[in-house]
Amino acid sequence: MTPITDKSFLVPFFKKELLPYFFLFLLPVLVHLPALSGHFAFDPVALVSGLTECTWQTNGLLAGQPWLDANAGVTTEALGALAAHDWLAGNLPWWNPYSGVGMPLAGEGQTPAMFLPFVLLLALPHGLLALRMLLMALSGLFTFWLLRGLRLSPLPASAGAALFEMNGTFGWLAHGPITPIAFLPLALVGLEQARAGKFPAVTTLGVAWSFLAGFPETAVLNALLAAAWGGLRLLQAERRAAYALRCLIAAVAGLLIAAPAIWPFIEALPRGFVGEHTGVQTGHFVAANLAQALFPTLLANPQAVPNGAAAVAGAWSRAGGYVPLAIVAVALSALRRRGPEVALRWTLAGFVAVTAARSAGLAPAVALFSLVPLLRQAAVHTYIWPAWSLAASVLVGFALQDWRDGRRPNSLFAAIAAAALSLAGLWLAAPAVAECLHARPPFYHPARAVIAGVLVTVCVLALLRIRATPARQILAVALPCGQSAGLFAFWLLAGPHGRAPDMGAVHFLQAHLGNGRVVSFGPLVPNYGAMFGIAEIAQNALPVPADWVDTARARLQPESNGILLYEGDLPAAEKLRRVVPNYEAMGADYALTWRGENLAARFTGATTAYAGTVMTVWTLPSPSPYAEAPGCTLHPAGRLVFVAACAAPSHLLRRELFDPGWTVSVNGVATAVNGDDIFQSVTLPAGATTVRFAYAPPGIEAAWFGCGAGLLLLRAGATLRWQRTPPLSVPVEDAHMHAAVAGEPRLSPATTPPVPAEEPP
């Protein structure tokens, strides 16, 4: 194949190929019509915020939720909204004062805090839905760009792009793992551009946005596919050193640009508690995962199955996406002995095979991955799905292009392999299917899921065995794409409707809480206080400051796993008498219970402050102030500025978590911030003083310097006059495809022109 020149990547948007771009841009809207209708809610506030009735349940058409992981709400939506509001207010989202007793925000390893400009969508109503649709559209557009650069015709390229746009990770998830997905094909576009001797600036953008997105596990595993792709292109390059240098500079520039997002996480990690995520990750698939990936509706939504269904729970806890059987079969049919880009096809297949061995828990693969930094800590089996989906989508594009150009895809091999995978997967998944059947969830028909998947697969493979006419090509594209769209929309039917958050209670707390905090015994689940500017002594974060975890376990909730601190129900009176004074000592002014529960009957001194539609707000009798200075009159101006008048030297105690990144000035003079238990203390002189606190991750100046260096490196690489690589010779068997892509008449072997001589460098 010829390397890709710059002009081949400059698609004249307003002159040709307009239809595929419109289709790919509008496809996310079409598949989200159930959520956009208003009848099937997508917003996690309706499901997991603790502000609506029947939290953690649904009344949608299907039992369950329209996404698998509640982190869609408690992390991406809630903390992302806090970061978005910080940006819009002109503040950097370094610190979260609303969870626990304060903790790093950008240093939390799952939030899109630095994901500009995309994170700003989370400041809007239904911002999470808008963010997912936008990322899907970009995924499709960038994949189409990649496939057209690989000399695929518009229809096969559109098919591959649409399939990646509706990949299983987008279909099942709505939290952190989806944010880097769109930028994997963008990075690969640059690797193709570099073959023509140009600087791959888009690889820099792809790498930067992948890590700015805030979920490093997906970004690292996507980079593994990019490394395999780039390694092949390096072996194929005529000037390997120059190709490697261009790609290395682009990747390093991207990492440097993302340094302000990467460094806060790295800096906070040594002081953080990460639970079971420490050390080498050895997690792997369970028996039902293979069939679950091939037939995505084979197992019922996990919220529709009782807790005792161990096989179902084990499968869903490891699920990170799916690739339906029809897509797998067509992708396998692209594996040929000869043809255009045959090395790339087998490289993609090899990548899937190696990472699948690791995901299955095979000992040699686990040992191999444990040798690589970052990969050893990644949950490969859960977060590898976007990379697999892109590999499958590219192979599907190649298979359809082969068929279009008269090269019969290897459909017999694909049929045999698909049948073997299906039979093995269904046999292994039998116990999980039996658990689902016993639970009898609504609209659950495993036999129909299998039959529909097999029928689509058989029809597509049968089409690939006969001559490709325009109508048959459209049908061959419509079948797998239509199936993917149907599967995508199916899960949205679980969204509830008619559920209104208890905004009256939220507004009451916003108006009366000030710098105080609340403790929740059910309503307002962790991190949703941050979304609404209400400080709550609860959190769901990773990593969590270890000092706070130790304190919370010792004084508040010994049974906490450290990552989650939350009382879902009103505790017994004995426990309340023990822990409520400790909550008060941490600045809790109010307690929240579900409507109808009586805190006063279990804890003496609590009084009703507000009765909402979902929750009751209780005033606690003896809360400690957020800040105090003995012998001083203290006037707070928010959480960061205090005006004090002291008759004698004193010290100010601020009940915010002590962290090395905090600095303070007293009357404009920098002063040391001391630790007082887990809180902050500052020495005050006699007289009138103004105390100003500020937070930034230690060493962030170097990260900003690195970001600037990355931008300069990008600028230098883009403007440097690189020596162009001469185009490679075009094999005769590729001439049909090249002519088809260019819109020219197909060439017969007798009329194939001679290969042109190499142009001078």
Image (tube, rainbow, N blue to C red):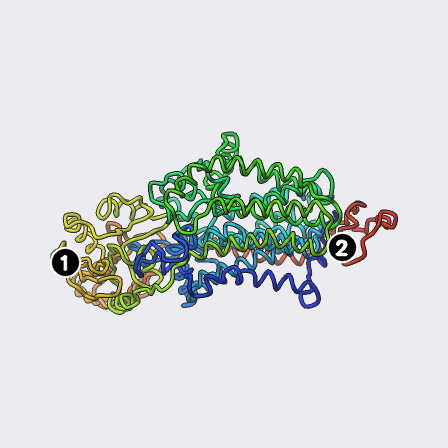
- Residue 740 image label: 2
Q: Amino acid at mark 2?
A: Ala
The residue most toward the top is 364
Q: Amino acid at mark 1?
A: Ala
> Is 431 left or right of 459, judged from the image as shown?
left
Residue 222: in sight, yes or no?
A: no
Image position, residue 106 (x, y; %): 41, 55
Residue 224's place in the image compared with 602, above or below, is above
Q: Write down the quadrant of residue 714 in the picture.
A: bottom right
> Is 81 left or right of 508, judged from the image as shown?
right
User: Which of 702 and 583 lies nearest the eye of the viewer?
Assistant: 583
Image position, residue 619 (x, y; %): 18, 62
Residue 460: in sight, yes or no?
A: yes
- Residue 600 image label: 1
Q: Earlier in the sequence, mark 2 or mark 1?
A: 1
The residue most toward the left is 604
> Is 373 left or right of 592, judged from the image as shown?
right
